[in-house]
Amino acid sequence: MLFPKDCYTKVGSFYKFFCTFVAYMCMNSENIIIEDNLHRLGSEEFRHCIAHVLCQAGRYTFEYNGENFVLEAGQTMIIPYQQFIEVVVPSPYLQATCIYLTPEYAEYCTPRSNYGIRGALALFANPIMLLTEKQFAQLQYDFEQIKRRLTDTTHAFQEEVLHSAVQMLILDYFDIHTSLFGQQKITFQDNDLMVRFMALLEQEEYVQHREVGYYADKLFVSAKHLSEVCKQVSGRNALFWINRFTTIHIRKLLQQKTHSITSLTDLFGFSSTAYFSRFVQQHLGVSPSAFYQ
């Protein structure tokens, strides 16, 4: 018996969702990690995880995206790109809890909403959120619920209640972020385009490709449309985000001093060391040679 074509599509979509659901249900120990310290924040081990931090006491000074930040008691932060954390200085009396989520599990637990990408982009610029006493208490409750559900293996529906607990945390973060930065209407189509664009950047496509047209072609839109959507969703055009990811990566390698200027020029596909030096000077405010002095 043959079914309509769209029926196969729907069945296939359901089957894909079901397989994904089963996979995530069997992998919570890998998808969620909770620690009552920040020792592994920014480590290579959790490089691709999204870190949710709640600070109960002390302070945590760090550098993120080339900017200096201080997380203090009663505040929270979300670090979506841990590879950009540097120069960490925790205070002796720091007390903080961190929940690490893999991006796949975080997406699975996030309700269908077009707010997530806007929040993520704002956190890229400033990961710290100031909290009211009520908001802090709510997040503390959410953190405790996730910890309790994760360890309660006797619950017959542990996977489902854990999923609900993580979803509640994400929604409470959405609410806090909205109270700080307001709401903005973004279509699901624009949200999806921005998500896919950022995914290409996270895959370090910018190392060899820094033209907006390259990303537009891969996303099957025009360069103009991509920049317009980026501007509407994030307040910045597409070229800004390409250069931002590139600059942070270059800065980190310059600080490590493991590559010569010539090798970095070749690695990032610049036509000459002079062009590379101009790019660094323009975006970092200093010449590459300054990092080797």
Image (cartoon, rainbow, N blue to C red):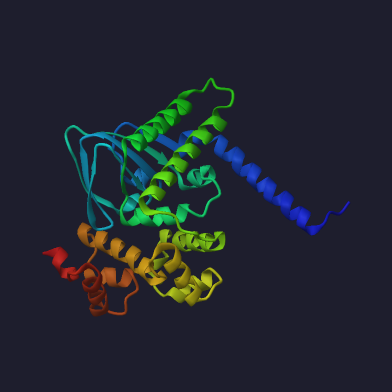
Residue at the spot 40% in from the left edge and 70% down from the top edge: 237
- In this orientation, which residue lies closer to the viewer: 57 or 279? 57
Give above or below for 154 relative to 187. Answer: above
Residue at the spot 50% in from the left edge and 35% down from the top edge: 28
Residue at the spot 31% in from the left edge and 41% down from the top edge: 131
Asked where in the image residue 259 lies, by quadrant, the reply is bottom left
Query: Would you say residue 257 is visible in this rendering?
Result: no
Q: In which quarter of the image is the C terminus?
A: bottom left
Residue at the spot 78% in from the left edge and 53% down from the top edge: 7
Asked where in the image residue 240 lies, by quadrant, the reply is bottom left
- 139 with respect to 91 (left or right): right
Residue 160, position as x, y percentages in the image: 57, 32
Give above or below for 198 relative to 24. Answer: below
- In this orientation, which residue lies closer to the viewer: 131 or 27? 131
Asked where in the image residue 187 lies, by quadrant, the reply is bottom right
Q: Going by the picture, which residue comes out furthest to the top? A: 154
Q: Going by the picture, which residue comes out furthest to the right? A: 1
- 6 with respect to 220 (left or right): right
Residue 89, position as x, y percentages in the image: 18, 43
Residue 133, position as x, y percentages in the image: 31, 35
Query: Would you say residue 132 is visible in this rendering?
Result: yes
Q: Going by the picture, which residue comes out furthest to the left? A: 293
Give above or below for 24 relative to 13. Answer: above
- 190 with respect to 183 (left or right): right
Residue 91, position as x, y percentages in the image: 17, 37
